Image: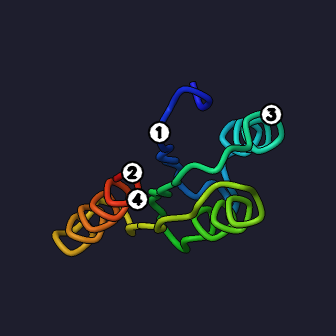
């Protein structure tokens, strides 16, 4: 539940050059009904181009949520992607302190 959480992590892959429709609907509901000043980390994966992460980032930055980072990987995360994800999580935790 967003109201009871200290932060949110949004995970979504790019789907036909967009945010997956069900994820997009859920994000619109969250921003419309549970728009809180909480840190948000965006995690995504893509095959051809990382579109979903940028679109989610735009949606989150226009809300009250505090965008921490967007970490996307092409396909299976490589070691450098995993390190970026760890850094994103560290930044998220730091904002909770």
Disc 4 designates what residue? 95
Closer mark to the observer between disc 3 and disc 2: 2
Q: Is residue 22 left or right of residue 97?
A: right
Return the x and y of residue 84 as percentages of the image width and height: 28, 71
Closer mark to the observer between disc 4 and disc 3: 4
Secondary structure, mark 2, is: helix
Q: Are marks 3 and 1 in contact (CB under 8 Å)?
A: no
Q: Label 3 vs label 2: CA separation?
A: 22 Å
Task: Please name whichever residue, 26 or 95, is drawn nearer the observer in this view of the structure.
Answer: 95
Q: Are marks 2 and 4 in contact (CB under 8 Å)?
A: yes
Q: Earlier in the sequence, mark 2 or mark 1?
A: 1
Q: Is residue 12 above or below residue 32?
A: below
Task: Please name whichever residue, 17 or 32, is drawn nearer the observer in this view of the structure.
Answer: 32
Q: Callout 1: few (<14), some (14-19), or many (20+) C-alpha neighbours within 10 Å?
A: some
Q: Residue at x 50, y 32 (%)?
A: 5
Q: Are marks 1 and 4 in contact (CB under 8 Å)?
A: no
Q: Label 3 vs label 1: CA separation?
A: 17 Å
Secondary structure, mark 4, is: helix
Q: Earlier in the sequence, mark 4 or mark 3?
A: 3
Q: Earlier in the sequence, mark 3 or mark 1?
A: 1
Q: Residue at x 27, y 68 (%)?
A: 87
- Residue 51's quadrant in the figure? bottom right
Q: Are marks 2 and 1 in contact (CB under 8 Å)?
A: yes
Q: Label 4 vs label 3: CA separation?
A: 23 Å
Q: Label 2 vs label 1: CA separation?
A: 7 Å
Disc 3 designates what residue? 33
Disc 1 designates what residue? 6
Q: Label 1 vs label 4: CA separation?
A: 10 Å
Q: Is residue 2 above or below residue 83?
A: above
Q: Is residue 84 left or right of residue 18?
A: left
Secondary structure, mark 1, is: loop
Disc 2 designates what residue? 96
């Amino acid at each position: 539940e967003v109201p009871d959480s200290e932060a949110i992590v949004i995970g979504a892959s790019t789907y036909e050059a967009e945010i997956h429709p069900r994820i997009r609907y859920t994000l619109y509901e969250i921003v419309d009904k549970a728009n809180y000043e909480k840190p948000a980390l965006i995690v995504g994966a893509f095959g051809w181009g990382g579109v979903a992460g940028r679109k989610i980032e735009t949606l989150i930055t226009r809300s009250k949520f505090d965008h921490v980072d967007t970490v996307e990987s092409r396909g299976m995360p490589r070691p450098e992607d995993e390190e970026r994800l760890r850094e994103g999580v560290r930044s998220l935790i730091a904002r909770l302190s």
